[in-house]
Image (spheres, rainbow, N blue to C red):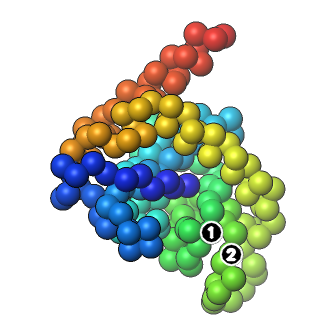
Amino acid sequence: WRQRREVKKGGKKEAGFSGKHRIKGIKRHFLVDGNGNPLSFAVSEANHNDQRHILDAADGIRIGKRKRKPKRLGLDKGYDSEPLREALRKRRITPICSYRKNHVSIKRGRPPKDRREKRYCRQRWKVERTFSWTNNNRRLDRMLEKTQRSYRAFIRVYIVKHYLRRLYKR
């Protein structure tokens, strides 16, 4: 899942130009669990394709020093491509992604399991809720940082704050 953000003028080298929206900006890619809690994230330039950085986010899930990976990964149509599906399957992750109208797939043997997993695509609202929770922090919503490195650090601080708040409620 991704979200595009406009960038302040100082961060020219760190942000790409989005031709569709005609602004300079970044994209945030979040991996969340079934309750909308962030597990991992990646930050990329707005002019890059969505599919470039989702594998970085999927590989970035860690619990302690152990790397973890999800069994299934629900994606929106922006991530629909056969090379991405193959890369996820090589990592033993089942891609659950809606096909675009102009999707062309190469048929090889049996159909993949991801066609049967439609119910996970109905939970996109949980990811959108995570983006809105993130945007409650003004510094993350407005992209006031000049570099992606400092922006990533503030997202990590937000994730720690989020989990501390969840622990405090219990």
| Mark positioned earlier in the residue sequence (2 or 1) | 1
Disc number for residue 69: none
User: In screen coordinates, is 117 left or right of 108?
Assistant: right
Residue at horizontal 45 percent and vertical 30 percent from the top:
137
| Depicted 125 relative to depicted 89: above or below | above
Q: Position of residue 77 (x, y in %)?
A: 62, 69
Label 1 neighbourhood size at 10 Å, few (<14), some (14-19), many (20+)? few
Q: Is residue 35 left or right of residue 86?
A: right
Q: Amino acid at mark 2?
A: Tyr
Q: Are marks 2 and 1 in contact (CB under 8 Å)?
A: yes
Q: Tell whether 36 sits left or right of 137.
A: right
Looking at the rendered structure, the secondary structure element under dot 2 is loop
Considering the image in quadrants, where does the C terminus appear?
A: top right
Q: Could you tell me which residue is drawn at 27 percent across and 58 percent down?
A: 15
Residue 105 at x, y percent in the picture: 64, 86
**Camera-side residue of 128 and 36:** 128
Q: Is residue 169 above or below residue 65?
A: above
**As shown in the figure, which amino acid type bears the numbered disc 1?**
Lys
Q: Position of residue 150 (x, y in %)?
A: 25, 38
Q: Position of residue 76 (x, y in %)?
A: 63, 62
Which residue has dot 2 on it? 99
- Quarter of the figure with residue 99: bottom right
The answer to whether one can see residue 48 in this image is no
Q: Nearer the viewer, residue 154 or 10?
A: 10
Q: Does the image show residue 11?
A: yes
Which residue is rendered at x = 38% and y = 69% of the image? Answer: 22
Distance (Cα) linking label 2 and label 1: 6 Å
Q: From the image, tell me which residue sits under label 1.
A: 77
5 above or below 136?
below
In-image side of 170 versus 40 (left or right): right
